Amino acid sequence: MNQRRSLIWAVTVACALLVALGAVAGASPDKKDKTVGRLLYGKVLDPRDNPLPDAVVYLTNTRNRAVKTYIVGQDGTYRFPALSTATDYDVYAQYKGHKSDTKSVSQFDDRSQVYLDLKIDIR
C-alpha cells in the first residue's frame, strides 16, 4: 500500500510539472518570433521596366554573412520566403556583368512581406 501511495504521488507531481511546463510554453510569443519569417520578393528590371530573365539575385544575411541566391524566370520575379524578422539583409542583382544598387531590409521594418524592385542599367 505504501508503494502505491508513492507511485500515485510521483504520477501526480509529474502531471503537475507537465501542466506547469505547458503553461510556460504557451505564454505570449515574442514580438520578434523568428519562426514566423518574412517574405522578400520583387522583380529585376532594366531602366525601361522590362524584366531581365536569368538575372541572379543575391541576398546576404548581415549578421552571419550567409548568402542565398535566386535565378529569376522569364517574368523577372524573385522571392525569398521564411526570412528571420530579427536579422538585417542586403539584396542586389546581377545580369551579364552589370549590377543593381544594393538595398537593405531592416529587422526594424515590421512588414511581413517586403517588395523591392532591383533595377540594372545594362547600357
Image (cartoon, rainbow, N blue to C red):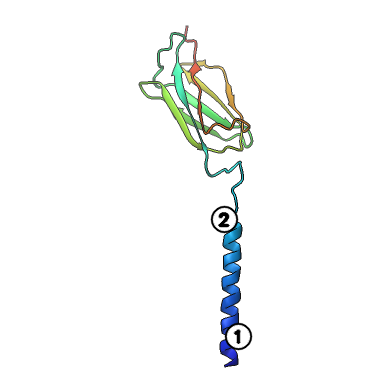
Q: Specify the amino acid type for callout 2.
A: Gly
Q: Specify the amino acid type for callout 1.
A: Ser
Residue located at (48% from left, 30% from top): 69
Q: Where is residue 99 in the image (x, y as percent from the top left)?
A: 52, 17
Residue located at (56% from left, 38% from top): 84
Outermost residue, bottom side: 1
- Kindly identify which residue carries mark 2: 26
* Quadrant assignment, res 5: bottom right
Q: Where is residue 43 in the image (x, y as percent from the top left)?
A: 44, 21
Between 108 and 71, the one lying in front of the other is: 108
Residue located at (40% from left, 16% from top): 51
- Kindly identify which residue carries mark 1: 6
Residue 121 is labelled as none
Outermost residue, top side: 123
Residue located at (58% from left, 37% from top): 85
Mark 2 neighbour class, 10 Å CA radius: few under 14, some 14 to 19, many 20 or more: few
